[in-house]
Image: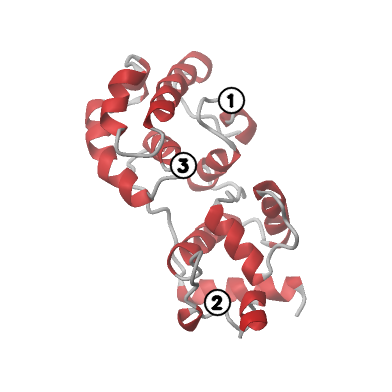
Amino acid sequence: MTKKERFEKLIAYFQENQPVAETELDYTNPFELLVAVILSAQCTDKRVNILTPDLFRRFPSVHEFANSTPEEVFEYIRSCTYPNNKAKHLVGMAKMLIKDFNGVIPDNINLMQKLPGVGRKTANVIASVVFNQPALAVDTHVFRVAERIGLSTNAKTPLETEKQLVSYFPDEIIPIAHHWLILHGRYTCIARTPKCHKCGLTDICKYFSETH
């Protein structure tokens, strides 16, 4: 099976079985999503969704974050991973958004990465979800799933995986493909004991063919 055929079969499978795939982070506007994605680094979406309601009630917009302090923000996010750093990033991000971008998230991935706490993965999520751009964020789930199935080959970094994936996925598929792969990795192709018996992709999966 060629890599092109593998991608075509994967796309057909998900289009039939998971035509709707979205982020599991709760948000009501692009800024809230940006905050939630920053908080989700090395933290579960479930945990982030528990703490963001109180956080957004206290800081309903970029201006409240910018006028706050890391110490105050910390009190609302102390239950997530690395709350000290994330509190600093959120306040710094809000200040820069107002100072350099008139309080509006830029739609350019490179510009987004100038914001504190925003790396390539976060910028790609925002570009994909908010601006519907052909950007594909590679987290640990996507990295693992792409390697196991055989969508990526010998990729050593998330960026290498990203480049391989976007070269095969059609542009219009990329935004939803990001969620397909994340959700598949989160619930089926899990890290330690993948649930191959529940997976509909075993006929194209290199890992399955090598282990069964």
Residue where numbered disc 2 is placed = 13
58 shown above or below 172: above
- Residue 101: where, in percent of width, then height? 51, 20
- Closer to us: mark 1 or mark 2? 1
The type of residue carrying mark 1 is: Lys
- Which of label 1 and label 3 is nearer to you? 3
Numbered disc 1: secondary structure? loop
* Image coords of residue 133 (percent x, y): 59, 46
Closer mark to the observer between disc 2 and disc 3: 3
Q: Which of marks 1 and 3 is nearer the N terminus?
A: 3
Is residue 173 visible to the viewer in this orientation of the structure?
Answer: no
Q: Which quadrant would residue 187 be assigned to in this image? A: bottom left
SS of the residue under disc 2: helix
Q: What amino acid type should be assigned to the residue bearing mark 2?
A: Tyr
Q: Is residue 74 left or right of residue 146?
A: left
Residue appearing at x 55%, y 76% in the figure: 13
Q: Is 23 on the left or on the right of 212, as rendered?
A: left
Q: Which residue is drawn at 68% across and 58% down?
A: 165
| C-alpha gap between disc 1 and disc 2 | 37 Å
Q: Where is residue 168 in the image (x, y as percent from the top left)?
A: 71, 62
> Count of labels shown?
3
Q: Which mark is residue 114?
A: 1
User: Of callouts 2 and 3, which one flags the residue occurring earlier in the amino acid sequence?
Assistant: 2
Q: Could you tell me the amino acid type at mark 3?
A: Ala
| Residue at x 49%, y 18% (from the top left corner) | 96
Q: Label 2 near label 1: C-beta < 8 Å?
A: no
Residue located farthest toward the front when viewing the structure as drawn: 192
Q: Mark 3 points at which residue?
A: 41
Q: Distance between the residues labelled 2 and 3?
A: 29 Å
